[in-house]
Amino acid sequence: MNLPININDLLTARTVEWERLEFKAGWNPEKILRTICAFANDFHNLGGGYIVIGVGEEDGRPVLPPVGLPAGQLDAIQKEIVELGYRMIPYYHPIIAPCEVDGKHLLVLWVTGGQTRPYKAPVSMAGAEREFAYYIRKGSVTVRAKGEDEKELLSLAATVPFDDRMNQQTVVDDLDLGLMRAYLQQVKSDLFSQAATMDFVQLCRRMNIVDGSDEAVRPKNVGLLFFNDHPEDIFPQTQIDVVHFPEGLGADTFTERIFTGPLHNILHDALVLIRTLVIEEKVVKYPDRAEADRFFSYPYTAIEEVLCNAIYHRSYEIREPVEVRILPDRITISSFPGPDRSIRKKDMAEFRFLSRRYRNRRVGEFLKELDMTEGRGTGIPKMLRAIEKNKSPKPIFHTDGDRSFLMVELPIHPFFDRETTTGRVPESVITPPVTPPVTPPVTPPVTPPVSRLLRALSLKGELGNAEIRQEFRLKDRKHLRKLYIEPALDAGLIEYTLPDKPTSRLQKYRLTEKGREIL
């Protein structure tokens, strides 16, 4: 079967129909064409979806064993699906994968988000029918887009997310077969057994990580992010910086680890390091009861969710790394840019990150198959549940008015920050305090870019604009000025070396006394 996931994973007992999955007991061309149209329109940027033909459903769940399709009709149905693709405007053809489950023949249609959306399909399959309509997914249902939904869908015309675009500066050989096979094996895809003998370009097309005609095949950005040994050479600053301040920001020493490589690998390796450095467990026993309490300095699940979301939602066109700062009393995780403007500051403060748009739908798709993220807005609730279970303080979200970055601050458990001399857990941990009134997130006094600039100046002494851009591999002067120079100057953390000639080509910057105090 030529799918990136295993058919059994689509039919597990916990699977239900949702925006990316539809079960059809039999062959119904009209309804299936509408669902193909809806998945291709990919209204919520989730990466399309799957249609499993030959499996009925009850209350959204697959009915097993499957009813299947007659073996003698499989070829005819596949040809009809191809013809159906020409009935859509513009043309669209899903990937068709015949398979067999419990001795029954099924057809699985992998319908990826189309690059020339929006698509529309005939309202009826009657021969003389000339009315077409746009279809989208609403939960587990395919519906006709109307009113505001239709307007919003039309606004997406010809807009392809960055991670799903072809990269014209690279070639297919920049994709690594070993990394691709390792991924397919990890997600238990049937493609793994075929990958060693299948034509390489065909394998790439099956995984939907290349595009273009046969004579001009080019990798997609998502393929390069996951299946190239050094994506940071193609997308500068695609990395995770883990900076450890064991004695706080005012100490003379800190350690820094920079993780580069395929996205899922650096995410895994950074999480392993963070877990080793910061996760501690303490057991609290009580004289009046047999049960003991266990507390962790940080709930690992919360750190994992925040870092996965940073990798998922960052922009790979902005040359800024994901930065993790480990301090004695907290961990901060920063990424660029910040949340979508549709998410209000009040919503952020109340932990409601509900957005209709996902910045990197394909990155999320690959991370989801690796069980690293769910991509359905469940990350924040999952993080909060882990924090509440551990009785840790709630996270704090920082951003600025331009939403140029997002910093998530995870305070350490109070038992590890304010342990008493008797070793007893503070009363505030046993009985959680009343939650204080919610306040909107604020911009921290030193943003992540300013922090990087201060550290560079502390090591180099004085740096000019060109030297700073080279240090951080930045090309955009406006980006440097807006995120680095101006905030540091306004806060009095750096100063000109030639204050009387601010536009001089010899102008450089150095730390002020206030800047040194911050470091």
Image: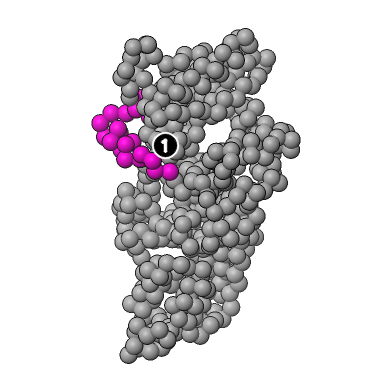
Residue 9, quarter of picture: top right
Q: Is residue 213 left or right of residue 514?
A: right
* Residue at the image point whose x is 51% and y is 85% from the top: 461
| Residue 392 shown in magenta | no
For badge 1, the amino acid type reads Thr
Q: Which residues are magenta?
A: 134-160
Other residues around mark 1 within 10 Å, as few (<14) / some (14–19) / many (≥20): some
Q: Badge 1 is on which residue?
A: 116
Determine the residue located farthest toward the left in the rendered image: 147
Q: Nearer the viewer, residue 259 or 88?
A: 88
| Residue 149 shown in magenta | yes
Determine the residue located farthest toward the front in the rendered image: 215
Residue 150, visible in the rendered structure: yes
The N terminus is located in which quarter?
top right
Helix, strand or loop at label 1? It is loop
Residue 18, visible in the rendered structure: no
511 lies above or below 213: below
27 lies above or below 109: above
- Residue 258 location (% of width, % of height): 60, 65
* Residue at the image point whose x is 39% and y is 35% from the top: 117
